[in-house]
Amino acid sequence: MAERIRSAVAAAAGPEGFREIKMFGGLCWTINAHMAVGTGDDDLMVYVGKDGTDQALTRGARPATMGQRTMGGVVLVAAEDVPDADSLDAWVRPAVERARAKPPKTPKK
Protein backbone atom coordinates (compact mmCIF):
# COMPACT_ATOMS: atom_id res chain seq x y z
CA MET A 1 0.00 0.00 0.00
CA ALA A 2 2.80 2.43 0.88
CA GLU A 3 4.37 2.16 -2.57
CA ARG A 4 1.01 2.76 -4.26
CA ILE A 5 0.33 5.81 -2.08
CA ARG A 6 3.85 7.14 -2.67
CA SER A 7 3.29 7.00 -6.44
CA ALA A 8 -0.14 8.63 -6.19
CA VAL A 9 1.15 11.45 -3.96
CA ALA A 10 4.12 12.05 -6.28
CA ALA A 11 1.76 12.29 -9.25
CA ALA A 12 -0.54 14.71 -7.43
CA ALA A 13 2.08 16.86 -5.69
CA GLY A 14 5.11 16.53 -7.94
CA PRO A 15 8.35 14.84 -6.92
CA GLU A 16 9.53 17.76 -4.75
CA GLY A 17 6.10 18.76 -3.47
CA PHE A 18 5.76 16.38 -0.54
CA ARG A 19 7.54 14.85 2.41
CA GLU A 20 7.22 11.28 3.66
CA ILE A 21 7.56 10.78 7.40
CA LYS A 22 6.98 8.08 10.00
CA MET A 23 3.85 8.87 12.00
CA PHE A 24 0.99 7.05 13.75
CA GLY A 25 2.97 3.79 13.65
CA GLY A 26 3.09 3.94 9.86
CA LEU A 27 3.91 6.41 7.11
CA CYS A 28 2.42 9.81 6.42
CA TRP A 29 2.75 12.11 3.40
CA THR A 30 2.67 15.83 4.05
CA ILE A 31 2.35 18.90 1.84
CA ASN A 32 3.61 22.18 3.32
CA ALA A 33 3.97 20.21 6.59
CA HIS A 34 0.22 19.39 6.59
CA MET A 35 -0.85 15.75 6.56
CA ALA A 36 -2.55 14.68 3.34
CA VAL A 37 -2.58 10.88 3.53
CA GLY A 38 -0.98 8.03 5.42
CA THR A 39 -0.97 4.29 5.92
CA GLY A 40 -0.46 1.94 8.80
CA ASP A 41 -1.17 -1.67 8.03
CA ASP A 42 -3.33 -1.91 4.93
CA ASP A 43 -5.65 1.07 5.34
CA LEU A 44 -5.36 4.40 3.59
CA MET A 45 -5.62 7.28 6.09
CA VAL A 46 -6.99 10.43 4.46
CA TYR A 47 -7.30 13.95 5.80
CA VAL A 48 -10.68 15.09 4.47
CA GLY A 49 -11.26 17.96 6.89
CA LYS A 50 -14.15 18.20 9.30
CA ASP A 51 -16.33 19.52 6.49
CA GLY A 52 -15.54 16.49 4.32
CA THR A 53 -16.03 13.73 6.86
CA ASP A 54 -19.72 13.04 6.22
CA GLN A 55 -19.21 12.79 2.47
CA ALA A 56 -16.20 10.49 2.94
CA LEU A 57 -18.24 8.21 5.20
CA THR A 58 -20.95 7.93 2.53
CA ARG A 59 -18.21 6.85 0.09
CA GLY A 60 -17.32 3.90 2.32
CA ALA A 61 -14.64 5.34 4.59
CA ARG A 62 -14.78 4.88 8.34
CA PRO A 63 -13.71 7.27 11.13
CA ALA A 64 -10.06 7.12 12.13
CA THR A 65 -9.43 6.56 15.81
CA MET A 66 -6.39 6.62 18.06
CA GLY A 67 -7.26 4.64 21.14
CA GLN A 68 -10.69 5.85 22.21
CA ARG A 69 -10.40 9.20 20.42
CA THR A 70 -11.83 9.86 16.96
CA MET A 71 -9.45 11.93 14.85
CA GLY A 72 -11.34 14.96 13.54
CA GLY A 73 -11.33 15.27 9.77
CA VAL A 74 -9.44 12.01 9.21
CA VAL A 75 -10.92 8.82 7.77
CA LEU A 76 -9.68 5.34 6.95
CA VAL A 77 -10.30 3.61 3.66
CA ALA A 78 -9.82 -0.16 3.48
CA ALA A 79 -7.24 -1.39 0.97
CA GLU A 80 -9.88 -3.44 -0.84
CA ASP A 81 -11.81 -0.22 -1.47
CA VAL A 82 -8.90 1.22 -3.48
CA PRO A 83 -8.08 -1.71 -5.77
CA ASP A 84 -6.63 0.32 -8.63
CA ALA A 85 -4.79 3.56 -9.36
CA ASP A 86 -7.94 5.50 -10.24
CA SER A 87 -9.78 4.64 -7.02
CA LEU A 88 -6.68 5.46 -4.96
CA ASP A 89 -6.19 8.73 -6.83
CA ALA A 90 -9.81 9.70 -6.10
CA TRP A 91 -8.84 9.86 -2.40
CA VAL A 92 -5.23 11.05 -2.66
CA ARG A 93 -5.58 13.95 -5.12
CA PRO A 94 -8.22 15.88 -3.11
CA ALA A 95 -6.23 15.32 0.10
CA VAL A 96 -3.08 16.70 -1.55
CA GLU A 97 -5.01 19.71 -2.85
CA ARG A 98 -6.55 20.33 0.58
CA ALA A 99 -3.11 20.29 2.22
CA ARG A 100 -1.59 22.44 -0.54
CA ALA A 101 -4.30 25.09 -0.03
CA LYS A 102 -3.19 25.67 3.56
CA PRO A 103 -0.36 28.10 4.28
CA PRO A 104 2.94 26.33 5.04
CA LYS A 105 3.54 25.59 8.70
CA THR A 106 6.50 27.31 10.27
CA PRO A 107 9.29 24.96 11.40
CA LYS A 108 9.42 24.10 15.10
CA LYS A 109 12.45 25.35 16.95
Image: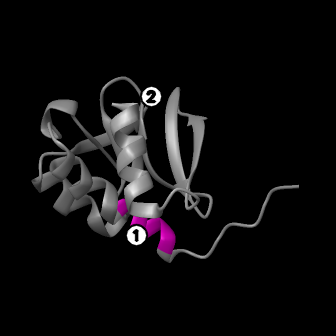
Query: In the rendered image, which residue does mark 1 sit on?
Result: 97
Q: In the visual, does 48 lie left or right of 58?
A: right
Labels in figure, total: 2
Question: What amino acid type is highlighted by mark number 1?
Answer: Glu
Depth order, front residue of 12/77: 12
Q: Residues within 10 Å of mark 1 (few under 14, many from 20)?
A: some
Quick one: SS at disc 1? helix
Cβ–Cβ under 8 Å for marks 1 and 2: no
Q: Amino acid at mark 2?
A: Gly
- The range drawn in magenta is 95-100
Q: Position of residue 53 (x, y in %)?
A: 27, 59
Q: Is residue 97 magenta?
A: yes
User: Could you say which disc has been placed on residue 67 in the image?
Assistant: 2
In the rendered view of the protein, which quadrant contains the N terminus? Answer: top left
The mark found on residue 17 in the picture is none
Instruction: Give the side of residue 4 with respect to residue 36, left or right.
Output: left
